[in-house]
């Protein structure tokens, strides 16, 4: 159990009163982020105990050992072995849900790509907070999921609405003709230097097009971007 930090507790006047013995396990491999989360949570008088771990394997073991009410899980954990099986964060979440279904999982991440959000929902994460949102959303998420409700910070909630409204189907219409050409060459496995030569532009221009494409379709991984392009191409977009 981590020691409590001095100072007045955070106040959340609009939040419903809840149990005053909430137990939380924080799992993050970035020490500064983890310590900041622990300090934040320990200022809340309703949170009785905060444990902390630094690997996917430790998160699984920590849930089994402590049976926390809430697990705050960093989505960007590198895979690690547990019981001889290599697990990424989503496989770990599934294992945690199997071992202790009463522990509610809240995802915290710097990524708000649809792939990560959809994967988190698939493993029954009850909350998802973006690191770009204000810190109080983490505390609010803990209180919300303990009450049996879901909690998604504004950045994440907006992405969920976009997906559910089917806006992803028309993202291809946002790309310019030159961006489509760039994306096609990327999907073929060409380097940025090769694409620059094919298009008769500078490498810097190719990098600018690539970033614009990723922002418009909200996919920031080259392999996933290539897969998306190929699906769109098959559909005649």
Image: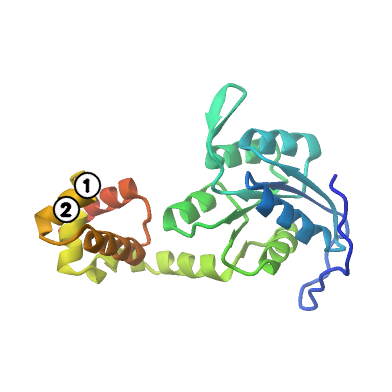
Mark-to-mark CA distance, 1 and 2 = 6 Å
Coordinates of residue 63 in the picture (x, y in percent): 73, 39
Displayed quadrant of residue 167 = bottom left
Q: Secondary structure at mark 1?
A: loop
Task: Pick whichever, 226 or 15, lies toward us.
Answer: 226
Quadrant of the rendering where the C terminus is positioned = bottom left
Which residue, given by chain and number where applicable, does mark 1 sit on? 191
Extreme-bottom residue of the structure: 14
Which residue, given by chain and number where applicable, does mark 2 sit on? 195
Image-based side of 84 in relation to 27, left or right: left
Task: Pick whichever, 80 or 144, lies toward us.
Answer: 80
Extreme-top residue of the structure: 84
Displayed quadrant of residue 162 = bottom left
Image-based side of 85 in relation to 149, left or right: left
Q: Secondary structure at mark 2?
A: helix
Q: For mark 1, does the 10 Å Cα neighbourhood hold few (<14), some (14 to 19), or many (20 or more) residues?
A: few
């Amino acid at each position: 159990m981590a020691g409590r930090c001095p100072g007045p507790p955070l106040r959340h006047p609009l939040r419903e009163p809840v149990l005053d013995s909430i137990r939380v396990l924080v799992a993050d491999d970035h020490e500064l982020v983890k310590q900041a989360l622990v300090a934040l949570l320990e200022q809340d008088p309703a949170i009785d105990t905060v444990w902390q771990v630094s690997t996917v394997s430790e998160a699984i073991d920590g849930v089994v050992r402590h049976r926390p009410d809430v697990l705050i899980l960093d989505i960007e954990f590198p895979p690690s072995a547990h019981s001889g099986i290599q697990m990424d964060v989503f496989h770990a979440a599934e294992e945690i849900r199997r071992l202790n279904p009463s522990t509610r999982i809240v995802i915290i991440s710097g990524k708000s790509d649809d792939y990560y959000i959809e994967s988190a929902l698939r493993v029954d994460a009850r909350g998802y907070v973006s690191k770009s949102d204000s810190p109080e959303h983490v505390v609010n998420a803990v209180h919300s999921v303990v009450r049996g409700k879901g909690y998604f910070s504004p950045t994440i909630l907006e992405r969920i609405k976009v997906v559910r409204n089917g806006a992803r189907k028309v993202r291809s219409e946002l790309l310019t003709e030159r961006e489509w050409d760039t994306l096609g060459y990327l999907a073929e496995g060409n380097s940025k230097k090769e694409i620059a030569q094919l298009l008769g532009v500078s490498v810097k221009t190719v990098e600018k097009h690539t970033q614009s494409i990723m922002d418009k379709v909200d996919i920031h991984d080259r392999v996933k971007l290539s897969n998306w392009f190929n699906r769109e191409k098959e559909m005649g977009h």
